């Protein structure tokens, strides 16, 4: 006889379960969306928050970390929109869609500024109108249970749906900004659905920022379909407040000869987790997935990705750089899966970490699962301190120690940043990294 023992729910899990029940009772919607929300609720009731007993979460134990769950915020008003401004980076020449405390700000968004051929709808509008974009919701969800994603789906409602018409070369980036400017802790659950048509090209920028000292929780998911021959450049800047919890999920599908260039910068939040689930559905597609993490104090930052090569001829490149100071904890978990039919796959993954303190900790877990026999795949991980000989060289040329350290750290991160092709966005990333380094040096 087999006995399955489930641990009692924590206070936070009880609060989340009650909030899910109340939300579904009052705003579940109808048809497929209601079914999705109820299924997500049932999954959460069965599995709860992931703990270190779950392999994918062994380094980021949410069951132990999350002690309470703030209420969701009401719709933003004029005051909140104005307060959000300092937390929204200026993205040159971009059309902006703004979320304040996890709620779409129609006053702070500029849907009319989007390029011709790019359509954006509030997610609730797309659902109510039966727009085909709403049919894509949860279509790319991983088969394995993901706690934060289940909550995002259970509280589904706020978000935006984007369509880029076939053949369109969008002249302006789309900036999706998330700001938590309030002094009261709230929870935000937002969803972005993007469908890029055949042969189209678009640049997407996501930013996340909020007030320090406020224990808000930000949970955002993106479902991105890149059509045959389409190109998507995605830049993500996570600078949440120093007491916040941040959960981000990217679900990605690449068509034939499609191309994705992703860069994710993480340097905010007390605890942050970014999950990437990418699947190659068309032959000869390419994904360049790169990022940089900077953490100090007692910050915990986790990047976890699974790249699934399901068809032949795909190419993926993953490069992540991590800089840890003080008692910070970094996590990188990356898996490349090559299916039996995915011959001629070329996949390379590398995680490199720079530890600026003897107390900093980095956990690396790169993996390969290969079921084909004609492939080129590799992975690696390194962790170490600053090169003392290089530091001595710079100091011998008259540079103060802090400036010498900053130069070496910038050079370390620059290898990943240089893959961002848009010069304005590359400069924005360098500016944000430099700001972090200057604060640390102060």
Image: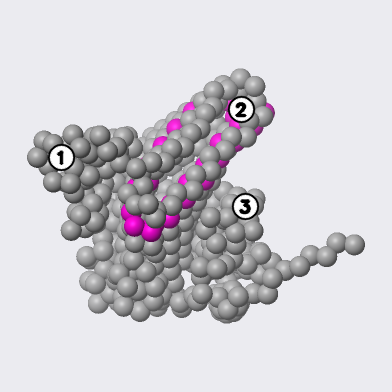
Dot 3 lies on which element? helix
Residue 55: mark? 3
Q: Position of residue 385 (x, y in %)?
A: 34, 42
- Residue 181 image offset from top left, x and y in percent: 29, 71
Badge 1: residue crowd in 10 Å (few <14, some 14–19, many ≥20) = some
Mark 1 or mark 3, whichever is nearer to me: 1
- Marks 2 and 3: in contact by CB < 8 Å? no
Which span is picked out in magenta?
Answer: 311-340
Separation of disc 2 and disc 1 at Cα?
51 Å
Q: Is residue 92 left or right of residue 419?
A: left
Which residue is at a point 38% across and 62% down the rendered structure image? Answer: 298
User: What numbered label is drawn on residue 342?
Assistant: 2
Q: What's the mark number on residue 299?
A: none
Q: Residue furthest right?
A: 1
Closest to the camera, between mark 2 and mark 1, is 1
State the mark number for residue 395.
1
- The residue closer to the viewer here, 264 or 434, is 434
Front-lying residue, 210 or 21: 210
SS category of the residue bearing label 1:
helix
Query: What whole-number distance in Å separates the C-alpha atoms at marks 3 and 2?
Result: 26 Å
Whether residue 59 is situated above or below residue 108 in the rendered picture? above
**Is residue 323 within the magenta segment?**
yes
Let me know if residue 387 is in the magenta part: no
Q: Nearer the viewer, residue 113 or 319?
A: 319
Q: Residue at x 21, y 58 (%)?
A: 439
Residue at the (45%, 77%) spot, across then down: 70
């Amino acid at each position: 006889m087999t006995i399955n023992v489930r641990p009692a729910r924590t206070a936070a899990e009880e609060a989340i379960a009650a909030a899910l029940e109340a939300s579904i009772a009052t705003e579940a919607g109808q048809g497929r969306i209601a079914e999705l929300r109820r299924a997500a609720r049932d999954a959460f009731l069965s599995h709860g928050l992931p703990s270190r007993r779950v392999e994918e979460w062994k380094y980021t134990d949410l069951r132990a970390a999350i002690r309470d769950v703030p209420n969701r915020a009401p719709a933003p008003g004029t005051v909140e929109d104005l307060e959000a401004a300092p937390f929204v980076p200026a993205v040159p020449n971009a059309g902006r869609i703004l979320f304040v405390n996890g709620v779409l700000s129609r006053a702070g968004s500029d849907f009319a500024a989007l390029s011709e051929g790019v359509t954006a709808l509030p997610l609730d509008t797309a659902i109510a109108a039966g727009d085909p974009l709403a049919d894509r919701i949860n279509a790319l969800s991983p088969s394995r249970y993901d706690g934060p994603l289940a909550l995002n789906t259970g509280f589904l409602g706020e978000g935006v749906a984007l369509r880029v018409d076939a053949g369109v070369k969008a002249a302006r980036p789309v900036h999706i900004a998330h700001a938590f400017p309030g002094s009261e802790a709230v929870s935000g659950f937002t969803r972005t659905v993007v469908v890029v048509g055949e042969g189209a090209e678009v640049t997407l920028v996501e930013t996340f920022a909020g007030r320090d000292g406020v224990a808000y929780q930000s949970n955002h998911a993106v479902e991105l379909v890149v059509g045959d021959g389409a190109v998507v450049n995605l830049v993500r800047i996570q600078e949440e407040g120093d007491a916040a919890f941040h959960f981000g999920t990217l679900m990605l599908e690449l068509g034939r000869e499609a191309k994705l260039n992703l860069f994710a910068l993480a340097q905010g939040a007390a605890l942050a987790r970014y999950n990437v689930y990418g699947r190659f559905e068309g032959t000869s597609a390419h994904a360049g997935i790169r990022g940089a993490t900077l953490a100090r104090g007692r910050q915990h930052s986790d990047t976890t990705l699974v790249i699934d090569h399901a068809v032949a001829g795909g190419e993926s490149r993953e490069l992540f750089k991590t800089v840890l100071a003080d008692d910070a904890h970094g996590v990188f978990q990356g898996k490349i899966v090559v299916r039996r039919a995915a011959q001629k796959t070329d996949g390379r993954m590398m995680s490199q970490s720079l530890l600026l303190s003897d107390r900093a900790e980095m956990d690396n877990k790169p993996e390969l699962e290969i079921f084909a026999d004609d492939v080129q795949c590799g992975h690696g991980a390194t962790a170490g301190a600053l090169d003392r000989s290089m530091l001595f060289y710079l100091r011998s040329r008259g540079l103060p120690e802090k400036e010498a350290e900053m130069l070496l750290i910038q050079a370390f991160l620059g290898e990943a940043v240089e893959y961002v092709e848009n010069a304005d966005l590359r400069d924005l990333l360098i500016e944000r990294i430099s700001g972090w380094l200057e604060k640390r040096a102060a």
